[in-house]
Image: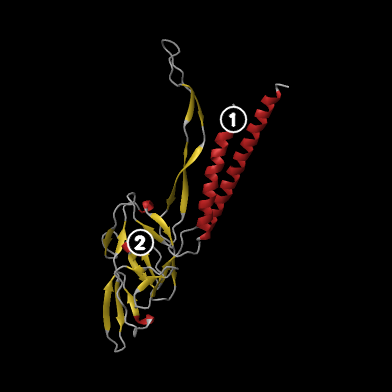
Amino acid sequence: MAITALHTAATGMQALSTKIDVIANNIANADTPGFKASRANFQDLLYQLRAQPGVQTSEESYTPLGTEVGLGVALSNTQTIFKQGSMTPTGEPLDVMIQGDGFFQIELPGGATGYTRAGNFVRNANGELVLGNSYGYRLKDSPSIPEEVSRDRIGISSDGRITATLPDGTTQELGQLQLARFVNPSGLLQRGANVFTATLASGEPVEGTPGNDGLGELMAAHLEQSTTEAVAELVELIKAQRVFQMNSQTIQAADESLRTVASLRR
């Protein structure tokens, strides 16, 4: 009966509504440093088996096909796509991007460790490097940079060594940054503010020096831009809108069929 079509089309509208939400978030973060765009993945629901395929009809023949009616679609998950973002030179010595695999490690309240691809760092009042967001999370293993060292005299090498040129002209190594990578980065939990945290799905972090053990190298005075591709997202948005409309038309057609059946009693 058409009642099945009503429920099936409703699942499609619900799933597509979530896809539009994901697309909207991608577009909204088109200018967020280190942002990784997500996509919505779908799966079909159970099927009503009205006739089994392969049923024996005689001693020598079997039904080649069956009758299976699907019950719609469901959102299976949202997947973060960790591809490399484009490079933008900024001229700021404390801006750092990762060219390749890996995450910066930051300290979260309570002692937990967060992970981010955003490299827009600034100095706090103690001379430590903190993430330039609304929370100012401290970069793990960040040294305390002397206050007499101006920002244009701070250097971050490709392997994560932080150096400073002192007022007397000498260069001093202040610390060494470590990166972390995951077997399944898409399994990380998104915490907002450009921060991820590890889960059982992501696996344990593998720490190392930039440029070693499969980790990317650092590029100072550059930022990794969002991986949102505006044109591609708009195309997906148009597709989602059209399919949403088709599902609504299916509901209208099923409703008219039910109305016709109901009118037979008159």
The residue beneath circle 1 is: 3
Residue at image coords 31%, 77% = 144
| Relative vertical location of residue 184 with respect to residue 124 in this rendering, above or below | above
Secondary element type, mark 2: strand
Badge 2 or badge 1: first in the primary sequence: 1
Residue 258 horizontal/vertical position (percent)? 65, 28
Mark 1 residue type:
Ile
Q: As drawn, which residue projects farthest toward the front?
A: 110
Q: Is residue 230 left or right of residue 264?
A: left
76, 57: nearer the viewer: 76
Task: Determine if residue 108 is in view.
Answer: no
Residue at image coords 45%, 13% = 57
Residue at image coords 68%, 29% = 259
Q: Is residue 18 left or right of residue 205?
A: right
Residue 59 horizontal/vertical position (percent)? 41, 10
Secondary element type, mark 1: helix
216, 28: nearer the viewer: 28
Residue 200 horizontal/vertical position (percent)? 32, 50
Mark 2 residue type:
Gly
Quadrant location, the C terminus:
top right
- Answer yes or no: do the residues labelled 2 and 1 have beta carbons within 8 Å? no
Residue 63 horizontal/vertical position (percent)? 46, 18
Tell me the crowding category of disc 2: few under 14, some 14 to 19, or many 20 or more residues within 10 angstroms, Cα based. Answer: many
| Relative vertical location of residue 146 with respect to residue 206 in this rendering, above or below | below
The residue beneath circle 2 is: 114
